[in-house]
Amino acid sequence: MIAPLPDLILFGRPGCHLCEDAHVILGTLLARRAQTGLPAPAIVRRNVEEDETWHRRYLTTIPVLAIGDRELELATSPAKVSRFLAETLDGAESPDGADSPDGAAPS
């Protein structure tokens, strides 16, 4: 039996145009993944203003994507989001191994 996909959490807040852009990017990328037979999890939106812990943790880096224990802060670039989805859902790595989903150099 195949395990169900974890939800894809999008942390943001109302009125955040970057968060709305990230939601559109996600919708487009996930539709493309589904069309090609790749896993496409459900998007669950979380308002950081509804939880003090989320607010402290994410307010300065929204939109933030989370799948399981992996996170991508400032998820505003389609290429960056696509790479995060591939690495997180498909186990794919960046071609040169230099880019991690959060933009930090590998250690």
Image (cartoon, rainbow, N blue to C red):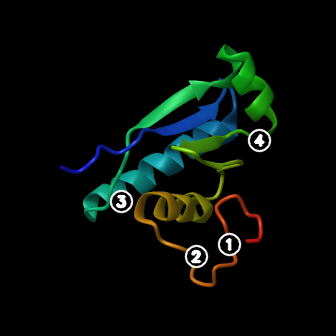
Instruction: Nearest to the eye among marks 1 and 3: give it.
Output: 1
Residue furthest toward the left? 1
Q: CA distance from mark 1 to mark 3?
A: 22 Å
Kindly check if marks 1 and 4 are in contact, taking CB atoms under 8 A apart as contact.
Answer: no
Q: Of the residues under marks 1 and 3, which one precedes in the sequence? A: 3
Q: CA distance from mark 4 to mark 3?
A: 26 Å
**In the image, which disc is placed on residue 32?**
3
Q: CA distance from mark 1 to mark 4?
A: 19 Å
**Amino acid type, label 3:** Arg
Q: Residues within 10 Å of mark 4 (few under 14, many from 20)?
A: few
Instruction: Nearest to the eye among marks 4 and 2: give it.
Output: 2
Q: Residue at x 58, y 76 (%)?
A: 94
On the image, numbered disc 4 is attached to which residue? 61
Kindly check if marks 1 and 2 are in contact, taking CB atoms under 8 A apart as contact.
Answer: yes
In the image, 37: left or right of 53?
A: left
Q: Quadrant of residue 105?
A: bottom right
Q: Residue at x 57, y 60 (%)?
A: 78
Q: Residue at x 29, y 43 (%)?
A: 4
Q: Residues within 10 Å of mark 3 (few under 14, many from 20)?
A: few
**In the image, which disc is placed on residue 43?**
none
Which quarter of the rendered picture does the C terminus lie within? bottom right
Kindly check if marks 1 and 3 are in contact, taking CB atoms under 8 A apart as contact.
Answer: no
Q: Position of residue 8 (x, y in %)?
A: 47, 41
On the image, numbered disc 1 is attached to which residue? 99
On the image, numbered disc 2 is attached to which residue? 94
Instruction: Identify the secondary structure beneath mark 2.
Output: loop
